[in-house]
Amino acid sequence: MSSKKKCDQLKPVCSRCIRLRLPCTGAGVQRFKFKQVVIGEPQTTVESKHFQPRKGVIASGAIIRDPNSATTALANALIEKLQVRDPRYDLCWAYGGLLNELPRRLGTNAALDASVSAMVTIVSHLGDKPRSPEVFSAYGKALVSLKTCLHDPIAVQSSSTLCAIYLIWICQAWVSNDEDMVFTGHSSGIIKLLSRVSQRKSVDEFDHMVHMTIAAPVIFERLVDPTIQLNSWLLKLLIATETPVIPDDDDGEGIGDLPNQPRRSQVGLIFSSVLAIADFMRYDPTKIDEIAHLHRDMQRTCVKLREKMYETLDGSDEKTFLDLPKHPRMEVTVKRLHDFYQKIYGLFLSLEVMLNAILQAYHPEDATLQSRNFEICQEIVWLSYAAQGLKPLGAGMIPVCLTSAWAATSDFSSRVLLEKTWSECWAGVFNLGLKTCGRQSAEIYERLRRDIWNANARSTSPVTSLEIERATKEEVSPQD
């Protein structure tokens, strides 16, 4: 009989397990050996004489190190701030999309780096009372670095230096407790730099964005200092590229933007309207019709924006679109759209109250203008309380509205109401009081009223004397 034999194809066992008499569990399984690696300078290797890598090409075996420098840390800190979408601390919402272009340009201009560092530091300590020493230190370093760049013949012509001035301008409003510092802007220096920069004919998008962004605060400072004059090339650029924030359904004519140009509607236009208002603050009776035209357009703009603001009052997170004339559609939430219209509405209310005050200077007995001035002040007070949830950065338009209304109105009760609103809504954020902020603008309106009164007095007295003399001669001549 033949006997059965068992299969001897047993599971292979490694020699180590046989020697130690252990059950082998890893037989036939590939194992890996981990070697200790010391991080340091890579070892030099002998390159093949048949292969020479091109410049700029990294070999596949090379390890790219993560950059670790002050510039990288600053860029990361800025990006972290720019990614905030809460309207209370949204930097781009408050100061423009130019800030999104800054991280990639850090390390190229010392003044820009220092000003970005100052802005990031200040935003991180906005709620501190009193201000942190770190804030003043960063701001001081930015000023010193800017001064050094302004003495460099190459850096002074750079758009990055202009951008640094813009950021320092922003920081100044949050840091300074000095009235003179707040009202002494950098417009004169900026205008001189703009006249020298070689990038004014540049096709670079960043240069164009810097010029357009920095021109905005310069234009608004003209409302406090009408002697500031923009460069002609920048003025033409602003007028040519400006688009309304809301469409105008009326084809009526507005005021001319440049000499010898036909009139166009100013509905929804910010820059050209501010430029015109700054000119109207100087006594010139020949411009009364133009002032009335622009006042009408600002009223129509405010009506349209108020309607848009109330249409989005529910403030939901539902997606919708922001449609601006000559701009691509932008997807936003209904709440953010409401915040946008609220912000722009406040801006145009400020422009309307300025024009109202100018017209009242020429027509002090006009009851309609007086009534509308009171209504605007009431509306600005309502906006101030409605924007409480957007402080500090998202409600940056509120101090402008309150200051403009306080300076423009001569009604005592309206001023008291505006001062009370400032103390309740904004005094805890801003360093100065409403009277201090509005004093310089109020002096401009007082000067205009005084110039008009003096002009009327000069034109009235001589005419009255001549009429009396002529009437006397007419009465005497028949008797002769």
Image (spheres, grey):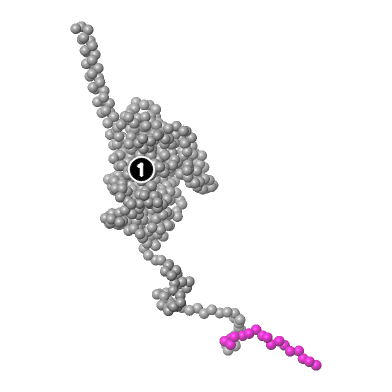
| Amino acid type assigned to the residue bearing label 1 in the image | Leu
Q: Is residue 312 above or below residue 66?
A: above
Residue 28 falls in which quadrant of the image?
bottom right
User: Where, quadrant-wise, is the C terminus in this rendering?
Assistant: top left
Outermost residue on the front side: it is 50
Near-viewer residue (391 or 164)? 164
In this orientation, does residue 132 appear? no
Q: Is residue 465 left or right of residue 321?
A: left
Q: How far across and how far down the image is residue 279, in percent?
A: 32, 36
Residue 3 magenta-highlighted:
yes
Near-viewer residue (48 or 102)? 48
Q: Residue at x 38, y 44 (%)?
A: 237
Q: What element carries label 1?
A: helix
Q: Residue at x 44, y 68 (%)?
A: 57
Near-viewer residue (243 or 415)? 243
Q: Is residue 113 left or right of residue 86?
A: left
Residue beneath disc 1: 235
Range drawn in magenta: 1-17
Residue 152 falls in which quadrant of the image?
bottom left
Q: Is residue 295 above or below residue 338?
A: above
Q: How far across and how far down the image is residue 133, in percent?
A: 31, 56
Q: Is the magenta stretch mostly helix, strand or loop?
A: loop
Residue 401 falls in which quadrant of the image?
top left
Q: Is residue 392 above or below residue 44?
A: above
Q: Which residue is drawn at 40% across and 57% down?
A: 103
